[in-house]
């Protein structure tokens, strides 16, 4: 059964209920709780860690297996040069403002946004349909605070001046050297810094894609929303390097033409297929559209509800400093529409920046289909003149002259004009095989922690079974941290139940054995953590070698032989209980 088929939930305090369950059942815990905790740092408990791994594996299946994008693993500590080049040291800032009265530091844009929304002004500043997505531009923030008289939301005191707060965590690499290091704010830079080696690895051919899953760090100024805004979080990023002249044609676009998504852009609000979105220029090109479609596939596979997933185009004001077009995949939770992934066209920004910073060439040679004949003006050295004139420097001057094409005006070597009698300028026709091109980068970048939280919220449900209220986590079956629970009905059946438990574990199921409390309580415990199937060993098991298999979602049960139990459960995992039990 699809998640969307269940009733829409209407708990006012859904996020509190989800967090309470997540903490109590070992999905999520505040880090360093025994020392009071730290905002923006969270642990995954045992069940949370398995769930997170399964989410990452679903992502690998789509991108590494399905797309042939290959993973690399680079350090989380980066050197200063990397972030000078990327622009993070100068541009990666939050706008913050301090309350003059209570000295709380606040995200200035959030304070303004909240004020505009609650006072009903926001809709006047932007297009009505996208008012909720509208972020006032940087320069407007101070102006708005002053002109609207916006005060501290905590104590009502006056606000000071808006200033920048850089989100990079700094460190030093090694003792003594004091070489500055930074914790990476995105995994992407490790991939860009490896570009020359990656290009060779992919045998100098575009396009190619590289993936990286790992921790990123941002010293967020107000990390207040559980695991939505963290200071240490997991990103799963892909950088696809593509010839810019080929962005409009993705080789596998035909696989996604009919994929339909919910769109919120400056020009369009509604549902559209990838083909329509490209044809109408809503999405800039096929490469972006293709990855938006794959992104949707991933989110649906891990249990984000389609009705609570939309793709929102960035407004020019909020676009990252490196991007020309960017779409956010947003999931609706009780925290509002939350960015789960960004799909950006980063153009050649990063490679050009690293080329400048490192002095190394960051281009790919793209051969023409057929060599082209090109007329070139070249400089031919005259050694019989240069030799006597420049003596031991003559060879160097001559070599320099041969590197010059299409000269204009005098040719200067080591600050002096080269005597024009020492060379001739000739026009020749040359055969050119191709061009050096700086690839553009299409980047689908996923936040794994936000995805995990959204999955938990979308899966959380409560219903009434036999007059008793139960919490049930309707996770996709393959994602559940415990896949099968095994219960003996009564103590005398423990030995048989352990046998079944061991059999399932040997067969590769994540299985838990539980013999404490009433059978009803055991079912409830496993419903709460999303265990899709419970196998119960009862008296009939001893008589005829069969067990009952109970479905988490419907609580229906069927009786099946132990001899074919693993096949039954695999089938149920794949096709669902109803389809496999008739
Ligand atoms: N390389 C591109 C990049 O880093 P981003 O939109 O800043 O783009 C990508 O981040 C994803 O990482 C976001 O869509 C979000 O899911 C996740 N993310 C970003 N900041 C986060 C934070 N402070 N806490 C948790 N997840 C975060």
Image (cartoon, rainbow, N blue to C red):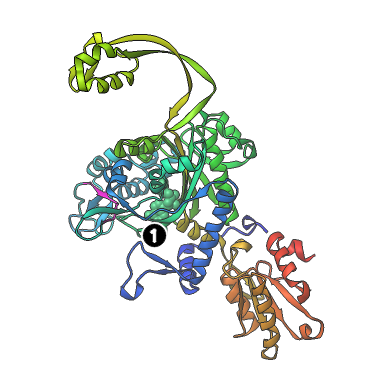
Which quadrant is the N terminus positioned in?
bottom right
Q: Residues within 10 Å of mark 1 (few under 14, many from 20)?
A: few
- Assess whether residue 169 is covered by the magenta stretch: yes
Q: Which residues are magenta?
A: 162-171
Residue 304 in sight in this render: no
Which quadrant is the C terminus positioned in?
bottom right
Horizontally, residue 520 falls left or right of residue 438, namely right
Q: Position of residue 23 (x, y in %)?
A: 45, 71
Instruction: Name the residue: 27% across, 41% down.
Output: 144
Q: Is residue 535 above or below residue 573?
A: below
Horizontally, residue 241 falls left or right of residue 520, namely left
Residue 97 in sight in this render: yes
Instruction: Name the residue: 77% across, 66% down.
Output: 581
Disc 1 marks which residue?
Answer: 225
Residue that protrudes farthest toward the bottom in the picture: 492
Q: Is residue 386 above or below residue 547?
A: above
Asked which secondary structure carries label 1, the reply is loop
């Amino acid at each position: 059964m699809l998640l969307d088929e269940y009733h829409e939930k209407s708990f006012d305090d859904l996020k509190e209920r989800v967090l309470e369950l997540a903490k109590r059942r070992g999905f999520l815990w505040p880090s360093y709780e025994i020392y009071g905790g730290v905002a923006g740092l969270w642990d995954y408990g045992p069940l949370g860690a398995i769930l997170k791994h399964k989410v990452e594996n679903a992502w690998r299946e789509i991108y590494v297996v399905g797309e042939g994008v290959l993973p690399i693993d680079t350090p989380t500590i980066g050197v200063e040069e990397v972030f000078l080049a990327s622009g993070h040291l100068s541009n990666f800032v939050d706008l913050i403002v301090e309350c003059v009265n209570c000295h709380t530091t606040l995200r200035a844009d959030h304070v303004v946004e909240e004020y505009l929304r609650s006072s009903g002004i926001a809709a006047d500043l932007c297009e009505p349909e996208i008012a909720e997505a509208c972020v006032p531009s940087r320069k407007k923030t101070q102006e708005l605070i002053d002109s609207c008289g916006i005060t501290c939301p905590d104590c009502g005191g006056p606000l000071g001046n808006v200033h920048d707060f850089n989100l990079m965590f700094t460190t030093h690499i090694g003792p003594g050297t004091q070489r500055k290091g930074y914790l990476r704010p995105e995994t992407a830079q490790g991939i860009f810094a490896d570009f020359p080696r990656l290009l060779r690895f992919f045998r100098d051919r575009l396009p190619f894609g590289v993936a990286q899953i790992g921790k990123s760090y941002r010293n967020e100024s107000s990390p207040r929303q559980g695991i939505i805004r963290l200071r240490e979080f997991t990103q799963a990023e892909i950088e696809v390097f593509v010839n810019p002249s080929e962005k409009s044609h993705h080789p596998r676009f035909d696989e996604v033409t009919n994929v339909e998504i919910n769109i919120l852009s400056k020009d369009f609000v509604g549902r559209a297929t990838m083909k329509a979105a490209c044809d109408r220029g809503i999405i800039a090109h096929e490469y972006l559209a293709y990855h938006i479609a794959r992104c949707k596939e991933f989110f649906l596979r891990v249990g984000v509800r389609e009705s609570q997933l939309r793709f929102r185009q960035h407004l020019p004001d909020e676009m990252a400093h490196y991007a020309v077009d960017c779409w956010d995949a947003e999931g609706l939770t009780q925290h509002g529409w939350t960015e789960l992934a960004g799909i950006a066209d980063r153009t050649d920004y990063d490679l050009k920046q690293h080329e400048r910073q490192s002095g190394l060439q960051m281009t790919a040679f793209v051969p023409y289909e057929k060599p082209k004949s090109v007329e070139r003006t070249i400089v031919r050295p005259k050694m019989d003149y240069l030799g006597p004139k420049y003596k031991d420097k003559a060879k160097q001057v001559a070599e320099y002259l041969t590197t010059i094409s299409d000269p204009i005006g005098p040719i200067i070597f080591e600050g002096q004009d080269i005597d024009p009698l020492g060379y001739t300028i000739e026009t020749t026709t040359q055969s050119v095989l191709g061009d050096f091109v700086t690839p553009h980068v299409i980047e689908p970048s996923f936040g794994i922690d936000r995805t995990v939280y959204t999955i938990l919220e979308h899966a959380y449900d409560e219903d009434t079974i036999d007059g008793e209220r139960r919490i049930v986590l309707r996770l996709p079956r393959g994602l559940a941290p415990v896949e099968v629970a095994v219960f003996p009905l009564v103590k005398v059946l423990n030995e048989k139940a352990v046998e079944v438990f061991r059999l399932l574990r040997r067969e590769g199921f994540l299985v838990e054995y539980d013999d404490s409390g009433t059978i009803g309580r055991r079912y409830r415990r496993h419903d709460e953590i999303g265990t899709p199937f419970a196998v119960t060993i009862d008296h009939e098991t001893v008589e005829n070698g069969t067990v009952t298999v109970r479905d988490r979602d419907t609580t229906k049960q069927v009786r099946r032989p132990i001899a074919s139990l693993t096949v039954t459960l695999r089938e149920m995992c794949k096709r669902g209980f109803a389809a496999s039990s008739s």
